[in-house]
Image (cartoon, rainbow, N blue to C red):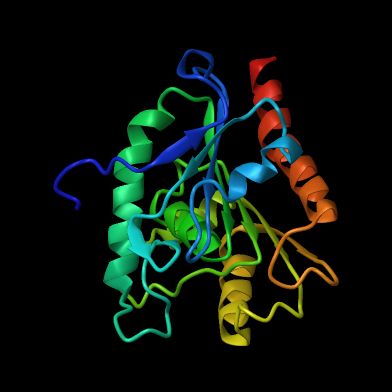
Amino acid sequence: MNEKTWNPTVIWSRPEEERAGTPLLVLLHGYLSNEEDLMGLAPMLPKEFTIVSVRAPQALGPGFTWFPLMQDLDYSFNEVKSAITDLWSWLEPISKQHSSVSLLGFSMGMAVATSLLRYQPEAIKTVVGLSGFAVPEEGTGFFNDEKLRQLRKPLFWGRDQEDPVITAEKVEYTHGWATTDVHLTKVLYSNMLHSVNAQEMAHVHEFLSAVVLKTEAEQEV
């Protein structure tokens, strides 16, 4: 798949002629979902963004996946690398049309978002992770965590401690990585389980407004 640019199925929040120069927010859905899922969040996000929701590459069951589940026998870090390099091959030329690129991922989509941030730390403005996790690298040198540590990119991580899907092992790894390598905003929500709620989305709106819109406005002055 990496021999040519990946051309995923996507949904845009605005027509092509209205996108140039706007901050871009890329939505990355979870396991067995699709590109339509997270577009329902668009009305709760800052209107200044151009939003694009991307379908994962592998069809599976009722939806799509970015790579096999980490507990599956066919999982390997190479599967993660393939998904991330394909995503970046598509996103890089698009990114040049926008003032910045931010990522919002739910569940496995957060694993994709944090992996892309670690692969291209200078290209990504910020990541919003909802009820998700980060992926251990397994020593391949694919992630540029040293550069990311220097840049201290802002990361929003919202979750419910009673989330029945994301295992304690994944949470522990993600917390250890995030507290070391990014500027972490971590918020816990009650009675949300493995989902999002209105309070969390209000916080996401505030976060994106502060770390993207406010900083870009200040740079223009």
Q: Position of residue 131 (x, y in %)?
A: 66, 66
- Residue 142 seen anywhere in this rendered image of the structure: no
Q: Is residue 101 left or right of residue 211?
A: left
Q: Nearer the viewer, residue 152 or 171?
A: 171
Q: Position of residue 174 (x, y in %)?
A: 58, 73
Q: Identify the residue at horizontal 49%, vertical 47% (top origin).
A: 35
- 133 left or right of 116? right
In the rendered image, residue 81, in percent from the top left (x then y), is placed at 31, 62
Residue displayed at 41% across by 69% down: 61
Q: Quadrant of residue 94?
A: top left
Name above or below for residue 202 compared with residue 23: below
Tell me if 10 is positioned left or right of 37 in this view. left
| x 38%, y 42%: residue | 9
Q: Nearer the viewer, residue 185 or 55?
A: 55
- Kindly identify the residue that appears in the image at 70 percent across and 27 percent down: 47
Q: Residue furthest left?
A: 3
Q: Nearer the viewer, residue 122 or 87?
A: 87
Q: Could you tell me how many numbered marks the image carries? A: 0
Up-down relation of residue 121 to residue 219 (above or below): below
